[in-house]
Each structure stands twice: as C-alpha cells, then as structure tokens.
Amino acid sequence: MRTRLALAVLVLAACSRGPAGKVAKVEELGALQQSPLIVGRDGAETARVWGQEVWAFGDTFLSVPNAQGFNFVSNTFSISATAVIDGGLALADRLDDAGAPLSLFQPTSDELAVDLAHQQLPDGGCLETPCGQRWATWPGAIVFDADAGTALAFYGLVTAAPGDFNFQGVGQSMAMWSSFDALPTRPAFNVCADQPMALFCQDEPSFGSAAVEQDGFIFAFGCNKRGFNWPCKLARVPFAQAQQRSAWQFWNGSDWSSKLGDAAEVFDGASILNVSFNAHLGQWLVVYSAPLSNDVKYRTAPKLTGEWSGEATLFTTDRQDAGGTSYDALLHSELSEDDGRILYVTFSRPTPGWFNSEFALVRITLE
C-alpha cells in the first residue's frame, strides 16, 4: 500500500509540471477534401505504411450502399499525399465491388450475420429485433515495421444497439497487415472467454488506443474511463510477439511486470489519443481532446514511461455553432514539418444534413 501511495504521489508531482514547448500560432486550413461517397465519419488515425499515408476512420455514413447493402459501416480508410500541399489534403478511397468505400477491418462471418439479421429493412422492420443492433470495429493505432514489411493495426471491438451513445466496448484487439494491396486479417486470440477476437478483455485497458514502435518493441497505451477521467496505462511487447498475450509486459511505475494487475497509471488522457516522438521538443508528445470540452490538450515526457507533464491546451476547436464538444482530435505526426515544430491535427465536426460531417485540418506552429 505504501509503495502504491508513493507512486501516486510521484505521478501527481510529475503531472503538476507543464509540458515542453509553447504554441506560437494556430491556423485552420479548412476541411479535408473527401469523396462525395462519404457523408460523414469520425476518428482519423493515420500511419505511413509501405510509403503510403493511410487514414483509418470510425463509424462512416455512405451515400451509396456497400457490397453487403449497408449505408452505415463501422470503419473506412483513405489514402492521402504524404505532405500537406497548398494548405490542404485530399483523401482517396479504395472501393469495394459495389463501388462504395471499403472498410479496413472486414467483419467476421458471425459479426456480419448479426449485422444482417438486425439491419433495418425498407418497411422499417428487421429480421431480428432490436433493429439496428450491430458489431463495430473502431480503428486504433497502426504500427508499421519497415524491416518486417508488416503493420499491426489495433482496433476496439464494440457492440452497439439503437439509440444515441448506446454502445459498449467489449475488448481490444489487433489485425495483421502484410501487404498494402490486401486488407488486414483479424485473427482470433481466444484469450477472453466471451470474445474470442479480443486480445484484451472488456474489463482491461484498451492497449493500442495509442502505440509506437521503438527498439523492436511496440509500446501501447490503454485508457479506460473512471468517472470523468481517463487514466492511461502503458504496456510493451516485442513486435514479432505482439499476437502472444503472454509476451506482453506492463509498466508498474518503476519497472516492467508480466502481471497486468501491476500496471500503473502514467497520465490522465482520453479514449482517443496518439503519441509520437517530437524531435523539435526532444520529448515524447501525446495529444487528445479533453473530455467534455473543445480544448485539444497535450503532454510531454522524456521517455514513454514518463515522467509525463501536466496537460496544456494546444488549441480550441472551432465547432462553427454545431453544438456539442470535440472528442476525436488527433495529431498526424507523419505530416509534421521542421522536426515537429509544425504540427497538423484534425477533428471532426457536424455539417448541414443528415449525419453529415467534415474534418477540419489545423496547423500548429510551436516556438
């Protein structure tokens, strides 16, 4: 008990210090240019894989039905230039056999069967009630190993029912991506008794919400809600053994442990966040939307294990009178310029129309 109390005091003391770097300028460059086949979507995880800049999005509304007959899917992905050109970026989508934007994570046969059974029919009914119940796979971090020529794509496994915010995360997992011309494959891990596809179970941290590779290891953060806060924990695993749950280790505040129960809270963040090394600051940088706020926050640390600074505001999102708050701001470190002195961040906001939305692209210049 004394050891845990001492660690908690150290974390609080570290987080009382402000982050490295100060914001000199913030400019909104406008909205990402996307296909009219996309009505709206959220989340915007990015990674550079096989020399391509890939964007992975969460729930997506389509203007045309996809090959399974759905106008609403749990994820899609796009490709963009690898640098911001003329103050903006245009996204291009890979299409399925029906000419609709393709999902990065394809449903399993069991998930698709549930989705089809509960799909709302033209008469307003469905084969099985409740109409609109579905499985969702929401993208997390994508980590690419150039030497292995392989990417690991984390995702959250979610069950959703009809109604606003009526969804529940039931596990965290990862897919294996071995070729840019193919889609990631989703292995069954059989770790969690009730969710064979999950690598981490419903009551465990969602490791992979943010992740990076360093020295042959994947370092993954997982943040789970507690009251109004999102305490984040840190895990690591050799890239080549990422699919082996027994190979994962967890930071206990002073060392790595094989026991998940030893994992310490390293900072307070959000459900959607990302982490990268910023050469301009000489620090690790984490960026996220503050819960129930329009402020985008950041923290810094000399090492992934900490000590992490207190949070500061990177900028405040412009919702353009759309109401609500921002929740999915993400930094796209692959697009950064001048060793990270110039950063690019996106966030989604509603636009006029049914389920319409866009992504604002913001340039931040640090001192």
Image: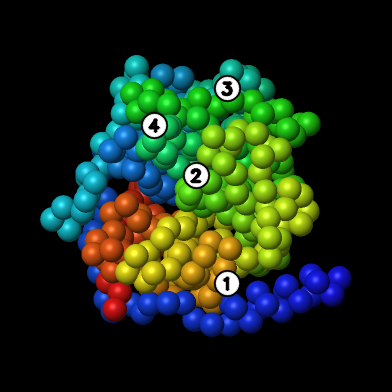
- Distance in Å between CA atoms under marks 4 and 2: 13 Å
> Viewer-nearest of labels 4 and 3?
4
Identify which residue, 267 or 255, lies in the foreground: 255
Q: Tell me the tag on residue 149.
A: 4
Residue in view at x 39 percent, y 69 percent: 282
Q: Does residue 245 appear anywhere in the picture? A: yes
**10 Å crowding of disc 2: few (<14), some (14-19), many (20+):** few
Residue 203 picture location, percent across and down = 74, 47
Q: Would you name the residue on which mark 1 appears?
A: 307
Q: Are marks 4 and 2 in contact (CB under 8 Å)?
A: no
Hey, what amino acid is under mark 1? Answer: Glu
Position of 154 with respect to 351 (left or right) is right
The circle on residue 216 is 2
Mark 3–mark 2 distance (CA, rounded to whole Å): 30 Å
Nearer to me, 156 or 304:
304
Structural distance between the alpha carbons of marks 4 and 3: 25 Å
Q: Report crowding for label 3: few under 14, some 14 to 19, many 20 or more residues within 10 A (C-alpha).
A: some
